Image (tube, grey):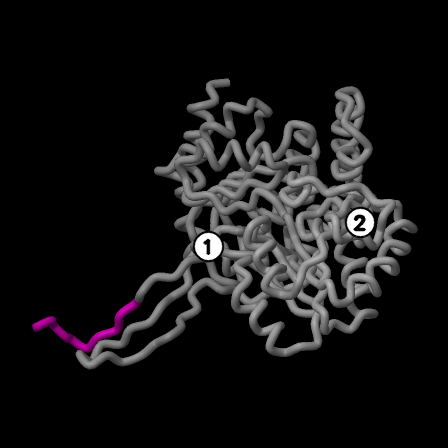
């Protein structure tokens, strides 16, 4: 296969399809989403058969249990894909929304209209359900998409792609609106991220190595985040039971996710009260604790936190703890070590909470809530294409609005500039 020519063809087809999708009605897009959902349910046995091929190959390659679990398509996960598409269909369509209309002294009306980005390239690993989720979000937001899944899920992704294309065809939309790259050759990624004349934005979903490569080599704008080094700060005026529950949930609800807490900051005024309680709860879940000198003075049996720990996304049952002297020191630590993903303060002091919200510069900043809420579904976006820690365009969980842009529109009655 000539990879360059193959990817160029996909790009041309996607560009042409994007013009049709941009003018598709909400009814047509929803019809396609619901038809795809039905096709996925009807093809459940085929999806599991193709997925079994990927699982056998994955075991032969030595994939660990966690990766094999992400790769597996069970009945419940197949149903979840279908339900996810139905949820996207139920969301408000952002395309064509007009805002901020106003008259100017010249007599013209000026406003902004929300429009699709065009063609979105999505590069992802392991989880076949991303194929359906990404296709659904791009379709509802009026974007054509080129999906390049991981080689470990090639059979599963192609089977899901068949369902998507069948649904698009039955709904009267171009099957080239969603294209799944058929080759596992890594050169396809290199081509996709440099096709700036045909692809408008790239979204990488996967490990740090993938995102670093895409960010380094892309000639197309990238929506990304590299790390999820999330913090919880327990203030000296916090409700201690609330703080205990939030600090436990933020770490232990799930370990291998980007919105899990990796560093706990505790005000020195209440550290001796709450840290022993938290240690008991973390020990029960076999969480390894690493602390600063002040923390280890209270919890002497835990490991020493190194300078490297404060900048590490563990994605594992490991937690770094630092005792700080107030909110300013906490925010200084976050400013120095955060990846800009999500930070939480637990406090009953309104002024302190307000300062934290205003001064902490991350994509999600919370008061008295677990970092685990930093998620498109939890934010009511229906689903997300990923998390962005960039500061331009989309930031935080990227849902339908994040896959659109705005253009200025002007309505006149014959005005000319003098």
Q: Which mark is residue 289?
A: none
User: Which of these two is toward me, 150 or 391?
Assistant: 391
Earlier residue among tags 2 and 1: 2
**Residue 146 placement (x, y as % from top left):** 51, 39
User: Which of these two is toward me, 342 or 205?
Assistant: 342
Placement of 60 over or under 332, stated as above or below? above
Q: Is residue 105 left or right of residue 212?
A: left
> Dot 1 corresponds to which residue?
391
Image quarter of residue 308 = top right
**Span of residues in magenta:** 409-418
> Dot 2 corresponds to which residue?
296
Local SS, label 1? loop
**Residue 142 placement (x, y as % from top left):** 48, 54
Residue displayed at 55% across by 58% down = 363
Q: Is residue 401 left or right of residue 383?
A: left
Placement of 132 over or under 276, stated as above or below? above
């Amino acid at each position: 296969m000539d990879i360059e020519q193959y990817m160029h063809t996909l790009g041309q087809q996607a560009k042409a399809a994007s013009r049709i999708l941009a003018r598709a009605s909400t009814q047509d897009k929803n019809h396609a989403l619901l038809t795809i959902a039905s096709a996925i349910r009807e093809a459940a046995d085929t999806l599991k058969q193709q997925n079994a091929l990927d699982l056998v190959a994955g075991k032969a390659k030595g994939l660990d249990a966690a990766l094999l679990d992400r790769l597996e398509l069970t009945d419940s996960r197949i149903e979840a894909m279908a339900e996810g598409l139905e949820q996207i269909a139920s969301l408000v369509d952002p395309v064509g929304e007009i805002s901020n209309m106003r008259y100017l002294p010249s007599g013209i009306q000026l406003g902004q209209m929300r429009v699709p980005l065009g063609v979105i390239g999505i590069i992802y690993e392991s989880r076949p359900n991303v194929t359906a989720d990404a296709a659904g979000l791009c379709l509802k937001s009026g974007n054509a998409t080129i999906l390049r899944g991981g080689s470990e899920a090639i059979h599963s992704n192609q089977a899901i792609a068949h369902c998507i294309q069948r649904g698009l065809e039955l709904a009267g939309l171009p099957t080239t609106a969603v294209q799944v790259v058929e080759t596992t050759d890594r050169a396809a990624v290199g081509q996709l991220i440099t096709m700036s004349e045909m692809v408008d934005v790239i979204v990488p979903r996967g490990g740090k190595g993938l995102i670093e490569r895409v960010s380094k080599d892309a000639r197309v704008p990238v929506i990304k985040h590299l790390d999820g080094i999330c913090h919880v700060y327990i203030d000296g005026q916090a409700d201690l039971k609330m703080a205990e529950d939030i600090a436990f949930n933020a770490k232990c609800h799930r370990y291998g996710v980007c919105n899990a807490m990796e560093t706990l900051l505790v005000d020195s005024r209440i550290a001796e009260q709450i840290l022993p309680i938290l240690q008991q709860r973390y020990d029960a879940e076999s969480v390894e604790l690493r602390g600063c000198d002040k923390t280890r003075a209270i919890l002497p049996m835990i490991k020493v936190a190194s300078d490297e720990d404060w900048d590490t996304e563990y994605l594992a049952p490991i937690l770094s703890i630092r005792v700080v002297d107030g909110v300013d020191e906490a925010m200084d630590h976050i400013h120095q070590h955060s990846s800009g993903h999500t930070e939480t303060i637990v406090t009953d002091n309104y002024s302190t909470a307000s300062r934290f919200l205003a001064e902490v510069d991350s994509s999600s900043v919370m008061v008295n809530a677990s970092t685990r809420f930093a998620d498109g579904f939890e934010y009511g976006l229906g689903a997300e294409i990923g998390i962005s820690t960039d500061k331009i365009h989309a930031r935080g969980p990227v849902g339908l609005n994040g896959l659109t842009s705005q253009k200025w529109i002007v309505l006149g009655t014959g005005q000319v500039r003098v």
